[in-house]
Amino acid sequence: MARSGQWVGDTLHLRPWDQLRRRELGAILRHELTHRRLRSAGLRRWREEARCLWAESHPSPPKAWPVSPLAGVQAHLDRALTGGGTREQAWAYRWLRAWLRHEPWPEAPKGRRAEADGWTKEAVNLAETITVVWPAERLRGPLTVNGQLLSHRSGKHWRFRGQVRFGPGFPIQSLDGGVQVDAKPHGWRLAWTASRAAWIAAATEGELGVEAPIEARRALAAVLGRWLEGHRHQHPGGVLCPLTHCAVVRGSASAGTVRAAAAAPRLDLDSRWAFFTGSAGGRSLSPREVWGEGPERPGGAAEVPGDRWLMWERTLSATDVAALKGDVRPGLKPGQRGLRLGGSGPYAVEDLRLAAGRRFGWTTWPSNACEAEVQSDGTLRLRGHGWGHNVGLCLATARFSAAQGATAEQILAEAFPASWRTP
């Protein structure tokens, strides 16, 4: 809100010169370059901003930083700097400068509760929010939030706002935004509400990992942005899950992934077909082949050296095959890939894959690009390529191509043919 510069990817954007000419440009650049140097340091928002303010007029850090404030003040500073209104941000910067000079800290703005509510409404107006829900059966054991051990009594619930950190051993490290925790009989139900941009960044990092090349992260963020337009209501109540059914979320994204997602290219793609798959194994399929509707032409995917899903083989017992026949109805839509199981069928490969995953585990039938042969003893021999449905952006290809120097735009152009684009 009061910033003079902002990093978007590797580019620093500054306010127009007529707004900067009365300020010391050197101090602005030192401030922003310090942000860049600290982006992977994992500091809290207020700590990073304090170091950047110090760098404006000092060539090196102090011998010792001042004593940290109480946890509540730190949380208030993080909220104000991340998305507070003008009044709260001005207070946060006054506080940080006083802290650095070892001066008395300014009081927080009066009517804090009212202003906090106003900040929440402002955030909703500026960016639509997404809610991700972890089911209770996924989150078990002791739970510590911001240093507080929660008592697991069924029916109790807690609400947190700002930067929420979870204790060691929990599947999630931290979340930024609104978090509600409910104690359920068999675990913890956790609901995270954040901006659309925060979800895209978190899902990008959850699927690719923080170590993935930046161009691969830009490409996936572009796909997730389009996917969200057509698949907002994946679960009852309009929420998303943190699993592969929607997109994997392991916590809030790192600063590097947030910047990569903010710099994602615009993808002129029909949102109905904005899909990605873990690996196509070099055998990409079209939406028509998998679901019996949509574009007929598949996109491109590379055979990535070292990809564990480049080729796979499985054998299902006669009992397993009989169970799948009971789970899946025969019949295909026009253009859909199918398999015969002995004298019955054909069955849609996608239906068989999903049924096998639900019944036997998701590595039982890894992908749709496969061939099947029923043996004389009734067993089913499967040979295939890839991990997932094989449609859209192949994440293994995205990582490989980006490491070879391809841009996100080039990766997306290969993955999505012109026939998938919006009219």
Image: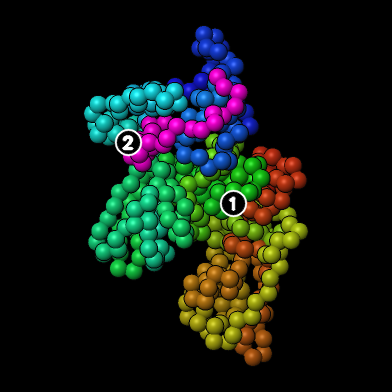
Q: What stretch is highlighted in magenta?
A: 57-82
Which of 408 and 27 lies nearest the eye of the viewer? Answer: 27
Circle on res. 209: 1
The structure's colour scheme is rainbow
- The picture places residue 166, in percent across and down from the top left corner, at 42, 53
Up the image or down, 369 lies above or below 316; here it is: above
Residue at image point 65% right, 77% down: 314
Is residue 281 rendered to the left or right of residue 272? right
Looking at numbered disc 1 in the image, what kind of residue is underneath it?
Gly
Answer with mark 1 or mark 2, whichever residue precedes in sequence.
Answer: 2
Name the residue located 55 percent from the left edge and 49 percent from the top edge: 205
**Residue 31, percent from left and from top:** 55, 24
Q: What residue type is labelled 2?
A: Thr
Question: If the image is split into quadrants, where does the C terminus sit?
Answer: top right
**Up/down of 337 relative to 258, above or below:** below
The Cα atoms of the two marked residues, 1 and 2, are separated by: 30 Å
Question: The residue tagged with tag 1: helix, strand or loop?
Answer: loop
Which residue is rendered at x = 46% and y = 58% of the image? 168
Residue hosting label 2: 120
Residue 58 falls in which quadrant of the image? Answer: top right
Label 2 crowd bin: few (<14), some (14–19), many (20+), radius 10 Å: some
